[in-house]
Image: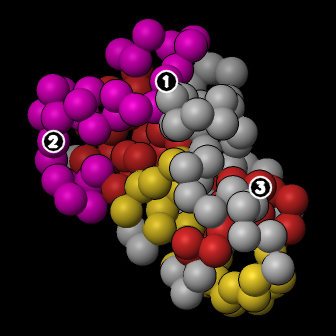
Amino acid sequence: MRRISVTVNGERHEAEVEPRQLLVYFLREELGLTGTVVGCDTSSCGSCTVLLGGESVKSCTLLAVQADGADITTIEGLARDGELHPVQQAFHEEHGLQCGFCTPGMVLATVSLLAESPSPSDGEIRLALEGNLCRCTGYQNIVKAVKAAAV
């Protein structure tokens, strides 16, 4: 067992973890943050995307011990005082979700994209989100949602 300390959604957590435990399972099972979705365990779908130090990462590709000392944001950490984050609001208004399975990962990847490129083109949006799969929407409304959040 290894002791780690992470800040998740602004709250400090210390825990003993198995060295081989994936970050996605630490977040879900140890911290109860089930908005981080387990989709494929192979980094293909992006449903497990979180922000690690502001950068989007697939939490199924990182060990919890690799996140020791890090600042992590999950989908549960975006809304403030009962108000949706602007990206969450844009996904809602532009119908950028259907079943919702991919939505947490899409939203967090979008937050990361807009932090780097506040006004991305459609091509830049599609390129940035290509590691996040949606099996329902066809991506048109997702791109519209990202554009709406960028404005």
Label 3–label 1 contact, CB within 8 A: no
The quarter in which the N terminus is drawn is bottom right
Earlier sequence position, callout 3 versus callout 2: 3
Which mark lies nearer to you, 3 or 1?
3
**Magenta highlight on residue 114:** yes
Given the image, on which type of amino acid does mark 3 rest?
Tyr
Amino acid type, label 1? Leu
Residue located at (17% from left, 34% from top): 124
The answer to whether residue 88 is above or below residue 125 is below
Comparing labels 1 and 2, the label whose residue is closer to the camera: 1
Residue at 23% across / 31% down in the picture? 127
Residue at point 66% right, 68% down? 64
Determine whether the residue tagged by mark 2 lies in a helix, strand or loop.
loop
* Front-most of residues 26 and 8: 26
The 10 Å Cα crowd at callout 1, few under 14, some 14 to 19, many 20 or more, is many
Q: Are the two marked residues, 3 and 2, in contact with CB atoms closer than 8 angstroms? A: no
Label 3 to label 1: alpha-carbon separation = 20 Å
Q: Which residue is mark 1?
A: 133
Q: Which residue is mark 3?
A: 25
- Res. 131 image quadrant: top left
Element marked by disc 1: loop
Q: Is residue 150 visible?
A: yes
Look at mark 2 in the image and give the residue it sits on: 120
Which region of the structure is painted magenta? 113-140
- Could you tell me if the residues under marks 1 and 2 are in contact, i.e. CB atoms within 8 Å? no
Q: Residues within 10 Å of mark 2 (few under 14, many from 20)?
A: some
* Rendered location of residue 76, percent (x, y): 67, 60
